[in-house]
Image: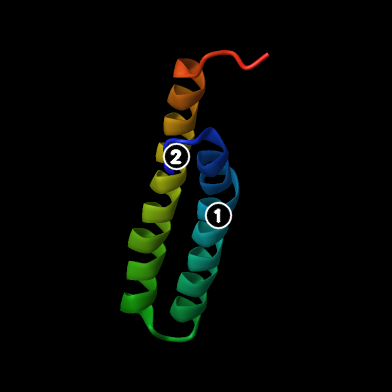
Amino acid sequence: MLKKPETLFVLGYMLLPLLALLSAIVGLTMILGGNKIAGAIVLVVVTQVFTFGAFFALRARKAAMLEQPDRS
């Protein structure tokens, strides 16, 4: 399932960047609300996990598209 280009497209371009944006908003809200350590952890660790996950999905999609035979 994670080898299909359509699934990797949804993960790389839609789902993971959206989750990275939401976790960045949550982290900044926590920092501004006074919970600085937990907010910094969410901002640095969780956001970066989603961001690198999106890059990984896009690279895997590119590789899957290149090895797939042409469906014309």
The residue that label 2 is drawn on is 57
Image side of residue 22 versus residue 63, left or right: right
Judge the density around disc 1: few (<14), some (14-19), many (≥20) Cα neighbours within 10 Å.
some
Mark seen at residue 15: 1
Vertical relation: 60 (above or below) 16: above
Mark 2 lies on a secondary structure that is helix
Mark 2: amino acid: Ala
Point out the residue furthest to the front here. 71
Residue 23, above or below 11:
below
Q: Are marks 2 and 1 in contact (CB under 8 Å)?
A: no
Q: Disc 2 or 1, which lies upstream in sequence?
A: 1
Q: How is the image coloured?
A: rainbow
Residue 13's quadrant in the figure?
A: top right
Residue sitting at x 48%, y 85% = 33
- Decide which of 61, 17 is in the foreground and name it: 61
User: Residue 44: where, in percent of width, then height?
Assistant: 36, 60
Identified by mark 1, the residue type is Leu
Taking the view exactly as shown, the residue that stands out farthest to the right is: 72
Circle 2: is it few (<14), some (14-19), or many (20+) Cα within 10 Å? many
Of the 4 image quadrants, the one containing the N terminus is: top left
* Viewer-closest of 3 and 55: 3
Count of numbered marks: 2
Give the Cα separation between the discs numbered 2 and 1: 11 Å
Q: Residue 72 in the image: x percent, y percent?
A: 68, 13
* Badge 1 element: helix
Q: Position of residue 3 (x, y in %)?
A: 42, 36
Query: What residue appears at the point 50 percent right and 53 percent down from the top-left corner?
Result: 16
